[in-house]
Amino acid sequence: MKEKAVKISRATVYRTLELLVKTGMVRRVHLGEDHYHYEHVSGNSHHDHLVCTTCGSVIEFHDAWLEERQREICKKKHFTPTFHNLQILGVCDSCKRKGEQPDAPDRVKMIQVAAMQLRK
């Protein structure tokens, strides 16, 4: 909208995002930050995320074996899944090459605090 010099309120953007989530065209994803990310949903576009706790980068991936294993676990536990969101927290290759260290304990605490704030 900025590129086309169209003025639009932030409230309109968020209302539109909520509408897109409700229609199933967009998925809301919480990646451990104090805000959500929104992803376009098309067909069987399910994927999971690797989240770098150092720089915040997100790597999307899909693994058919992992998906099948999750289905087997649900079946074994007599559990009917409706949705899942797998996130693996760690350090990306770029940060690792720079010698940066993860700040995992603080990151985990930050995620817990953010989750509590979302519940309020």
Image (spheres, rainbow, N blue to C red):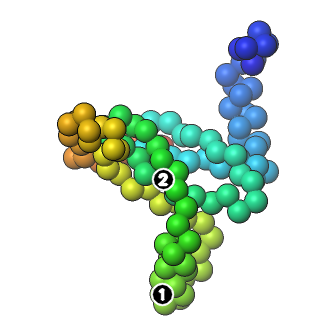
Q: On the rendered structure, is 79 left or right of 96?
A: right
Q: Is residue 56 visible?
A: yes
Circles 1 and 2, Cβ within 8 Å, touching? The answer is no
Report the residue at 35% width, 44% height from top.
92
Residue 30 horizontal side relative to residue 111, left or right: right
Q: How many marks?
A: 2
Residue 72 percent coordinates (x, y): 51, 85
Residue 118, given in percent of the width and then of the height, sits at 48, 43
The answer to whether residue 117 of the structure is visible from this angle is no
Question: Which of these two is toward me, 71 or 77?
Answer: 71
At x 54%, y 40%, the residue is: 36
Q: In this image, 47 relative to 58: left or right? A: right
Above or below 115: residue 75? below
Q: Nearer the viewer, residue 67 or 16?
A: 67
**Which label sits on residue 77?**
1
Query: Residue 4: which quarter of the image?
Result: top right
Q: Which percent across, then down, holds residue 40? A: 70, 46
Which residue is at the far front? 97
